[in-house]
Amino acid sequence: MSHKSAKDFFRPLAVGAPAPPREIPARPSRAIHFFDPSNEKMAAKIPAMVGTVDVLLGNLEDAVKADNKVAAREGLVRIAQSTDFGPTQLWTRINSLDSPWVLDDLTTLVPAIGDKLDVIMVPKVQGAEDIHYVDRLLAQLEAKAGLTKPILIHAILETARGVANVEEICGASPRMQGLSLGPADLAADRKMKTTRVGGGHPGYLVRQDPPKGDDGTAQIDAQRTVFQQDLWHYTIAKMVDACATHGIYPYYGPFGDIADVVACEDQFRNAFLLGCVGTWSLHPKQIAIANRVFAPSVEDIAHARRVVAAMGDGTGAVMIDGKMEDDASLKQCLVLVELAEQLAEIDPELKAAYDAIETPEA
Ligand SMILES: CC(=O)SCCNC(=O)CCNC(=O)[C@H](O)C(C)(C)COP(=O)(O)OP(=O)(O)OC[C@H]1O[C@@H](n2cnc3c(N)ncnc32)[C@H](O)[C@@H]1OP(=O)(O)O
Ligand SMILES: CC(=O)C(=O)O
Ligand SMILES: [Mg+2]
């Protein structure tokens, strides 16, 4: 758990730093869209993407060539200073804490664009000590820069030790905003025998039992249905529980098979159903998938509103379409209705779709 006493937890870690947040606002973040600020073609597209995606993230870590680390950092400063992000959040992913670049990342970004950065994503977080380090450094830099709003921290869960320490990571600082799954590094660190960036694997499966022959013996060579399983189920579920416990937000991560938009949608939807609030987008075409998946469907909202209306004061049990609804199913429906309301505030298309649902009588 935290190195601080309960009374100290919400005190600034440097004289003059802004007070740490007591709650992390539920800002829509269906897609965290990654771009390499050192890639001029990609960077040129960013201003026009404002308003089309919930989060734009200037990536400084993996996928940025070592020779381009300084250009990426400077490119991000330039883009942030010259762009009005309106409703879109600006995040960055800094280099890992053991890298030769991270100190310059933080000491450059916070004074230059700290007023525009909503969240700093920290990769390869191993335990609370990593968050404590960033927490104190951010407080010092914020104080020096005269910032009035604390920058939040998001940790990537991408080492076995990080997964084992997920609870203490979530509770390490009031700045903790959320966690993302880092399936590529996590697979390597765990020594999983995969070569992909997220998603499933055809070898990770369950096979239907063999039929029995006339003599009662198992026909193991018969045609049998196989069901591919989700390699990430355990980690995502663990991450969701840790985030919910600490009042912060869980996200799926990257889906590297950019061409396979169908499997990408499946993976995102699994994460949405399990409790994640969003995911990463590596390529512009993944934004639409994330925006679609991480918003409740019109059908779900129509049903949820019927349950809310039928449940009156929220106690007791009612029957709707042959199914029992009670306090607990009402709470699930309220999760969906509240999310729909938040998204409707920033997405006119969704608002129109939700508004068109016929309101049930109370
Ligand atoms: C495991 C991890 O750490 S995951 C996180 C780190 N990885 C990343 O951040 C990867 C980010 N994405 C990318 O680098 C690229 O999208 C790649 C390498 C996957 C594919 O790039 P390309 O082969 O150029 O893709 P493609 O040819 O389809 O691009 C089409 C257009 O979209 C642009 N584009 C591609 N990706 C992005 C992006 N993330 N943001 C903005 N524009 C983009 C391209 O510049 C190109 O522009 P053009 O039409 O003017 O030429
Ligand atoms: C997300 C990430 O950094 C990884 O999968 O390694
Ligand atoms: Mg990684």
Image: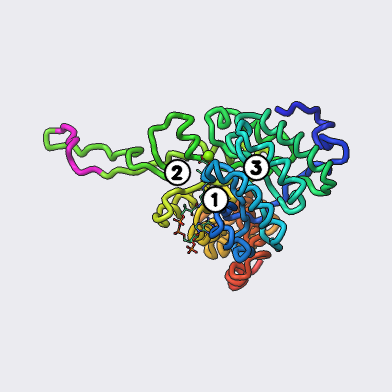
Q: Residue at x 71, y 35 (%)?
A: 134
Amino acid type at image mark 3: His
For the C terminus, the quadrant is bottom right
User: Crowding near pointer 1: few (<14 within 10 Å), some, many (20+)?
Assistant: many
Above or below for 258 versus 67: below
Tell me what residue is drawn at x 42 percent, y 57 percent.
Answer: 261
Estimate the x, y position of residue 30 in percent, counting from the top left: 58, 55
Q: Does dot 3 land on a helix, a strand or a loop?
A: strand
Mark 2, residue position: 197
Name the disc covering residue 52, or none: none
Q: Residue 359: in sight, yes or no?
A: no
The image quadrant that residue 346 belongs to is: bottom right
Does the beta carbon of the residue at mark 1 sit less than 8 Å from ligand 1?
yes
Q: Amino acid at mark 1?
A: Trp
Q: Which mark is residue 154?
A: 3
Along the viewing direction, whichever of 156 and 250 lies nearer the viewer: 156
